Amino acid sequence: MKNLHVVNASAAIALSIFGMIATSHLIAQTTPAASAPACPMVIVEGLTSGQGVLYIAAYSSEETFSKKALWQMRAKVVETSMQFPLCDVKTDEIAFTSYQDLNENGKLDANPLGIPNEPYGASGSPPMFSAPTWQTTRVKFDATSIIIVKM
Amino acid sequence: MKNANSRRQFLKRSTHCAGAVVASHLGAMWLSQIAHATATTGSPTDFKMQFARALKSDNSLTPFAGVSADLSCDNLVIEGKLPPLLKGRFYRNGPALFERGDQRYQHWFAGDGMVQQFNFSGNSVSHRGRFVQTSKFKKEEFAGKFLLPAFGSAIKPSERITGPDSMNVANTNAIEHAGKVLALWEGGSAFELDRDTLETKGPIAWQSGWEQMPFSAHPKRDPQGNLWNIGSARNTMLTYHIDAKGRLAKAQTAKLNFDPRRTGGMIHDMAVTERFIVVPIPPVVIHWDQIEKGKTGRDVLTTTPNEPLRVWIGRKDDISQAKIFELPSEMIFHVGNAYERGDEIILTYVGAVANDFLGGTAVEIMRGEFSPARESVLKVARFNWSSNQVKSERMSTRGVEFPRIHPALIGAENRYLLTTASWKNTSADHRSIQFDGIELFDTQSGKTQRYEYGQDFMPEEHIFVAQSLATPTTHTELESWIIGTAFDKKSGRSCVSIFEAGNLNAGPVARAWLPYGLPLGFHGNFHGDFNG
């Protein structure tokens, strides 16, 4: 697998699109992987290459959605598409939210109406006119899953 | 009006004009598709089929067929004599592209905006029409198909919607301010266009972090050259004060004390007075949840007749000092003007009690059907800031729209209101959108001057054009011109007519003819050379 970036993230990310607060205090180190593990995968597409940092988080229930991440990471954006293995993630359903922090200020910037000014994405079928929810974002998850998040 | 040139001559003289004539016929390939189509009723594909069928037998539909490319003509054919002092740029904006591939928008307001610029030099007129290069337009132009939904149009999204500008078609109004041409929509950013080329420069964020903030389509420029505008989203009201140099002087936000999603709150137009911003909030509900489900028309745009017409009035300098007045339920698209007289704030507007335009007429025209015209009249409302009393009354006859006043009297007391109007045929089967002509209503005497265009023409919004920078009085208000566009069904061409406001009944003193037809548009403004 090319251009793989594995991130050891240690803090939470909360993301709620359209009227949202996005906070993150991630302290992450990116480490290129030598080879591809046989793991489920999340692929983030539509990134603006060479700009800022990608934040991505996964949730496993409606109760924890946008509050407590099951898995999260931060990575310098170096490609238009970036993929991450989810080797240690165990859940039947999963929901991803992500944003590209173009100006690297550690948050998803939004206008006063809460509409993001930076690229964001979610798994599943994001709603047209409102923030993603657990219901719109969740997808089935198992050891063979390859989940796409479009920015 | 004397014809300086016969209409035939234009064909010979218009050699420097380029652009697709309004599409009046669809190709044979498309006709074969019709025969095999199995579109569901009401789908974008179904709309395209129905419109194509209707267009064959009704040339009134031609200006709703749309255009597919930019237009230009460097020397329009002139009938009559242009006023030598009429120099400047007349802008109009409107939905101009309705179809891609086998799909057609399901609402007139969805069409991608094209800004028209008529350049008046004193003895000639040139024209340029360019599509606003919104992100939606560019992506779909490249793809050759619709990728995103639009107002009242259930196009299944195949691109991400990341905010209102994803669907911004910049199609409602155009104004030149401080050297910039603004193409305006309602729900998102204004787009800046180059004044000389109409090339799109991009969406405007009036201050850092205000990307995609709604900047409505009816800003008002006061006599001092300040541009005032509003924006709205759910229960948030935004106001903008752009100074005469085009810089944001102040932006404010305030919360409304009701939920427009429940009571209705499609805010379209606004007025200013010396101290206040006046915003009618008609009880129209946009059902976003139904739009997500692919619904259109009356399923997504409804009026709530048990809800009042609310009018929000806020102080320009501090909109936290605001009041909401309530009037009987009524639809307002457009205001005429507002001004203060003592404690009273006086607002003139076009009101419609039983308005079915948004969910009905504007949908049906995209299928090639004209709905019956509904009653819409000139009204005046008086709001007392001290006593909180309000009353409204009717001023004129039925069938008016697009109210405009002398531009130098915005926010000050004006006497005359100009409208596009229907007065000849008052029967229930009279077609909406097809006006008889223009009316000039004298609010002092109650009298009306009219010019009837004739049955071949489809006149659009007309506007006052000042003859100088001087602020007119009630006695000199008509020392101005009136100009406006119309589509000639017979020839399939559009024209700009120029009238002397004080002698409207006499008809146009000049008419500038394009060699092609334009889609019917919405709103526009004139920027005189003396305005800088």
Image (cartoon, coloured by chain):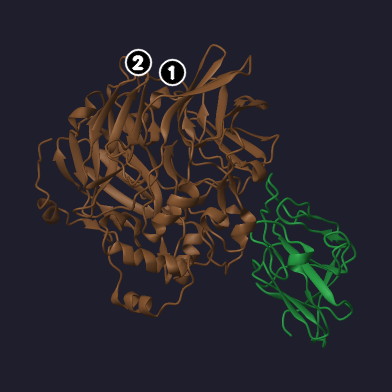
The picture's colour for chain A is green
Task: Report helix, strand or loop for mark 2.
Answer: loop
Mark 2–mark 1 CB contact (< 8 Å): yes
* Residue in front for this viewpoint, B245 or A41: A41
Residue B196 is left or right of residue A52, and the answer is left
Whether A85 is drawn above or below A105: the answer is below
Amino acid tagged 2? Thr
For the residues labelled 2 and 1, the Cα–Cα distance comes to 8 Å
Q: Earlier in the sequence, mark 2 or mark 1?
A: 1
x%, y% of residue B163? 62, 55
Residue B233 is left or right of residue B73, and the answer is right
Chain identity of mark 2? B
- Spot the residue most to the front: B428
Chain assigned brown: B
* Residue in front for this viewpoint, A144 or A30: A144
Near mark 2 (Cα within 10 A), the count class, few <14, some 14-19 or many ≥20, is few
- Residue B474: assigned label: 2
Whether A5 is drawn above or below A74: the answer is below
Residue occupying image coordinates x 61% and y 65%: B160
Res B386 visible: yes
x%, y% of residue B34? 37, 75
* Residue in front for this viewpoint, B418 or B496: B418
Res B97 visible: no
* Residue in front for this viewpoint, B383 or A58: B383
x%, y% of residue B348? 46, 26
Amino acid tagged 1? Glu
Whether B241 is drawn above or below B427: the answer is above
Chain identity of mark 1? B
Q: Quadrant of the C terminus of chain A?
A: bottom right
Residue A97 is left or right of residue B284, and the answer is right
Task: Report helix, strand or loop for mark 1.
Answer: loop
What residue sits right under mark 1 in the picture?
Answer: B413
